[in-house]
Amino acid sequence: MSIGRLAGVDELRRARRTSRGLYWAAGLFSFFVNLLMLTGPLYMLQVYDRVLGSRSEATLVAMSLLVAFLFVMMGLLDYARGRILTRAGARFQAALDRRVFDAMIRRSATSNDASAQTGLSDLESVQKLISSPVLMAAFDLPWTPLFLAGIALFHPYLGILAFSGGLILVLVALCNQIFSRHPQYRATIASQHANVISNELRSEAGTIQAMGMRDAAFTRWQDTRSEALARSVSATDVVGGFTTATKTLRLFLQSAMLGLGAYLVLQGEVTPGVMIAASILLGRALAPVELALGQWGIVQRAIKGWRSLSELLARTPPEPQRMLLPKPSATLDVQSLSLVPPGGQTPILRSVSFRLQPGQALGVIGPSGSGKSSLARGLTAVWKPATGTVRLAGAGLEQYDAETLGKHIGYLPQRVQLFEGTLAQNIARLAKQPDPEKVVVAAKKAAAHDLIVALPDGYDTPVDGLDTRLSGGQMQRIALARALYDDPVIVILDEPNSNLDNEGSGALNRAVAQLKEEGKGVLIMAHRPAAIQECDLLLVLNRGICTNFGPKEKVLREMVDNHKAINKKISMGGVQ
């Protein structure tokens, strides 16, 4: 196991150790529960060997009352340890919820790591194992050899049969683990793939309906779903076969114990009570093994979840605590910045340098695939620099924690996504209690206030992140308001007018002008010239390399011969 993986495992173990007292309590209760499990065999032993021989009804009544009390106590203790383990599982999950969520978000933003996609479900799988009867069976397993040894005390032959049967059941359990691991893994992967396809198709339901793609979409989904179903059936068949074999073998062993006990009774070597008690004791000894096999799917998912979580936490260590810096000025200094996309090896952006002063707007232009959106991800610290530095008011972006940096640098991504909640909560970046004043100010700056109050529920309009009824232009204005919510000093807009009409483009330019007047810095990644009307500087990218940078007029003059005609159209807002 690598050092990094060990770090992740150690973090999980520390979270598990927070419930050490609960595990000790569960172990103590398990001791008494298993001790009380001897009540049944001892009762039968006394009934057959003492009560039936003496024909004493008083003895039978007294023993029956005592046994009833002991079984009630056993049930209460068993219920109590189940509640204890449930709370241990909940405490384990609560201790890691924030850590796993942060690691999942950070890792998903910078890589295609599969463990990042399933982090929370992996944590839930481990929590379910801790809270499940399987863990109680693990506490009971150490008693199995003791119960088998107790059977051997009755008679050596009975002990040999019990130990042989127990050994066979252990071998069946090992075979189950070996032969079911691969089918379970393939079934899980196939099911996850089917869910991904289903979510993709649901999110693009409008496009599918409009383009007559329903049959093709169903066929695509059905293929993945059928594969997942087939693999799930195959895995269930394997596990079910071992589970059935275990149950059948346990029932046979109990009957065999009765048969061997009856033979020994006929030979005068044991009493009838021993025959019955040995059969009951054998069933109790083998019960944990059968329970573990019956719920082996939970164990397999938890093992996989533990491994995935350890990898995720190891690859995404906790962010260090950073000293809170004062609110910076809108001075952005980029020096020799190179970026490598997640999972890639070739830089998509090479040695880009520029400086943005307060009150300036910089337009970043270039053909598709030139690196404009990649630059935006680098300037928001979503992607870490391969080489070079990005400084905000002289401090490197790495000196700010993500929450603080997000307040200083507003970001409007190229692909707008709203989240489940109200419009006010979306503008307030999912805050439970949005600041009404800040929400309205941000919406007005983004020219979104009027369109929001025109809706029946206004700012309280609910939004479904996967199926919003807002137009692309409306979503873009709301996303711009979200970028402006915390009064950032730098605002990065990636294709901000891709879904806007002339009115929306004019509103965008007015918003940029207002930000400049307030001393903010604005970066606009754009294809359409109308978006750079308010820009003072231009940076030209081509295949990830800066080919020109400087004042807008100068850069345009060097790029095109008819710069005057283009500038005239830009100033009129007519080039779309």
Image: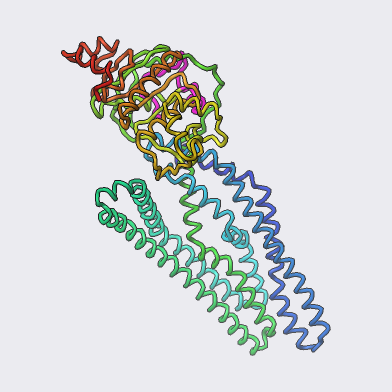
**Residue 241 seen from this side:** yes
- Residue at 43% x, 20% y is 490
Res 59 quadrant in image: bottom right
Q: Estimate the x, y position of residue 85 in percent, counting from the top left.
A: 63, 54
Q: Estimate the x, y position of residue 10 in percent, counting from the top left.
A: 54, 41
Q: Estimate the x, y position of residue 213 in percent, counting from the top left.
A: 26, 52
Report whether 243 appears left or right of 473: right
The answer to whether residue 104 is above or below residue 341 is below
- Labels in figure, total: 0
Res 278 quadrant in image: bottom right
- Residue at 54% x, 18% y is 325
Q: Quadrant of the N terminus?
A: top left
User: Which span is picked out in magenta?
Assistant: 381-408
Report whether 29 appears left or right of 341: right
Report whether 30 appears left or right of 458: right
Colour mode? rainbow
Instruction: Tell whether position 484 is magenta.
Output: no
The answer to whether residue 317 is above or below residue 488 is below
Q: Nearer the viewer, residue 25 or 382?
A: 382
Q: Quadrant of the C terminus?
A: top left
Res 160 quadrant in image: bottom right
**Residue 6 seen from this side:** no
Q: Nearer the viewer, residue 244 or 526?
A: 526
Instruction: Tell whether position 405 is magenta.
Output: yes
Q: Nearer the viewer, residue 552 or 530?
A: 530
- Find the residue positioned furthest to the right: 58
Q: Estimate the x, y position of residue 205 in percent, counting from the top left.
A: 33, 49
- Residue at 72% x, 80% y is 45
- Residue at 71% x, 66% y is 74
